[in-house]
Image (cartoon, coloured by chain):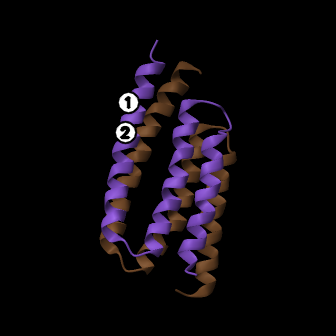
Amino acid sequence: MIEFLQVVLAAIALLGAVATAVSRDPFDKLIALGVMIGGIMPFIVDRGYLDVAVAVALLAPITTIFVLALAWRRDEHGA
Amino acid sequence: MAPELILGLAILIIGAVAAAFPRPKTYLSRIISLEIPGWGLLLVMLAYDETLALLTFIAVTAISTFVMVRVVERREAP
């Protein structure tokens, strides 16, 4: 991969990881997790593992939806 | 050293610290923080070209998150 692109994507992934760790609201955490996954995906595609990229693209949002349902239910109860 | 390995190790360490000391100390934030080291481990596996391990790991991570969400849901129910 182009080195500039590599540095930018690594910075995006690291910023997403730190933001997920630091933010307090569950919804903020999930959004930051999405930013981190967006930074990691091009590395998988760059190695040529398109089957792995397809599996990640299908399973990552499903996991987010499960956790989102739990976060929404907790928010509704006001906890 | 492959850039994937360095980035994966950095994310793995950040995620491990975040899962050990979550900011609001709740089950939910710990589950979300547990996703971070999973992605770091995925990048480390990517650096060593283990396709079968990657696919298995992704599938099992999704299923285990589903199971953990169910368990926490049941425990949090009044």
- Tell me which residue sits at (30%, 70%) in the image: A51
Residue B9's place in the image compared with B22, above or below, is below
Residue B61 placed where, x, y %? Answer: 39, 49
Residue B74 placed where, x, y %? Answer: 40, 21
Q: Amino acid at mark 2?
A: Phe
SS category of the residue bearing label 2: helix
**2 and 1 marks in contact (CB < 8 Å):** yes
- Tell me which residue sits at (52%, 23%) in the image: A76
**Res. A38 mark:** none
- Tell me which residue sits at (54%, 34%) in the image: B28
Residue A43's place in the image compared with B28, above or below, is below
Q: Which residue is mark 2?
A: B66
Q: Which residue is mark 1?
A: B70
Residue A62 placed where, x, y %? Answer: 36, 48
Q: Amino acid at mark 1?
A: Arg
Q: Chain of mark 2?
A: B
Residues B68 and A79: in front is B68
- Tell me which residue sits at (53%, 74%) in the image: B4
Q: Chain of mark 1?
A: B
Q: Say which chain is purple.
A: B
**Colour assignment, chain A:** brown
- Whole-Å distance between the Cαs marked 2 and 1? 6 Å
